[in-house]
Amino acid sequence: MRIPAADLRAQHAGLRDELIEAFRRVLDSSAFINGEDVAAFEREFAAFCAVPHAVAVANGTDALALALRVAGVGPGDAVALPAFTFAATAEAVCHVGARPVLVDVDPQTCNIDPQALRDSLRRERVRALIPVHLYGQPAAMDDVVALAREHDAATVIEDAAQAHGARYRGRRAGSLGTLACFSFYPTKNLGALGDAGAITTTNADLAERLRALRDHGQSRKYEHAVVGFNSRLDSIQAAALRIKLRHVDEWNRRRRVIAQRYRDELRDARGITLLTERAECEAVYHLFVVRCDERDSLRRYLDERGIATSIHYPIPLHAQPAFAAIAAGRFPQAELLARQVVALPMYPELSEASVEAVCLAVREWSAARRS
Ligand SMILES: *Cc1c(COP(=O)(O)O)cnc(C)c1O
């Protein structure tokens, strides 16, 4: 029996009838785009994040690009973001014509390093900052928000694509900056059955502008105040997301239990370094990532025992051909992490027996590696 890195089949098995009933309802309503389910999902997701407004869009990358737009970021502007993240964080900055300013990360958390951010803000004027809550752990938001204030009141936009439900000093991801962007890509902690995304904010004016921007810049039908986009959410995705949203807290609790098991069992495994969960954070373990100098050997050992692993991400942004020219620099921690990180299986339906099997295999590898 193989243990996959993630398992959507297991998640959907228990929700099948409810999902099919929701599809039937949307089919019969014929309101396929921005229908009632979209408005209801926006209300429910805003409540989940403890903010007044959520605006549903087509995907997480659009969420970032539209958030940058309403924050007034455009050509000639610079935007700070970590050098170690999924490409979409930097892509969105390029899509609005701005320039990504990469910042090195803290190898203990894989999140943006406040000291490195302070240093780059001394050199560069940035219009916005995008802290990423990588793997489900909130970035050092107190430092990020304070630095943003000190430096030309730059707008803080959370990339919360991996952190649905995570908390920082008791507050939810999505409520920690001026704007926050979520992806509901199927494997995220809250995933649609296709592409979907959302932006949350406490600012009613920004929310209203986002609603217009995602729908061809319309404030009313066929009245186009601004040049907009087509980045609407399908009702069928909203209907599925509403069903799944009710389970996210319980799924995240289970992810945290699994993470604690991994921590307890792998703490002393030589050749493996655990990441730190900071005291002010309640991470939601989108992924459970460890660092390992002999990553290929570990992965091969686990694969031979039917255990899948994955790498997020093997290449830091500044080494990607897409960004090399516009975001050059040296980011030693990002480079180190790109060589070391490996994600162990993590999904709420992962059984106790499977967690135990993974731990045993990692410990065996650890014990065998020097002999
Ligand atoms: C998934 C993800 C995105 C982009 O989301 P899409 O919905 O795939 O466009 C952005 N940032 C991070 C950190 C992500 O993990």
Image: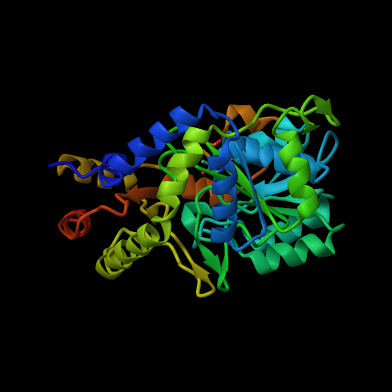
Q: Position of residue 38 (x, y in %)?
A: 57, 41
Specify the quadrant that holds the N terminus.
top left
Q: Quadrant of ligand 1?
A: top right
**Image coords of residue 296 (percent x, y):** 31, 42
Instruction: Give residue 23's quadrant in the image.
Output: top left
Up/down of 104 relative to 236, above or below: below
Q: Residue furthest front?
A: 28
| Residue 200 can be seen, yes or no | yes
Q: How is the image coloured?
A: rainbow
Viewer-side residue, 189 vs 5: 189
Residue 40, image x and y in percent?
A: 56, 47
Q: How many marks?
A: 0
| Quarter assignment of residue 6 | top left
Q: Is residue 166 above or below residue 314?
A: below
Q: Quadrant of residue 226?
A: top right
Residue 347 percent location from the top left of the image: 32, 51
Check the image and name the residue furthest to the left. 1
**Residue 100 appears anywhere in the view:** no
Residue at the (15%, 44%) spot, across then down: 305
Q: On the rendered structure, is 14 left or right of 243?
A: left
In the rendered view of the protein, which quadrant contains the C terminus? bottom left
Instruction: Look at 20% across and 56% down and name the residue there.
Output: 351
55 or 361: which is nearer to us? 55
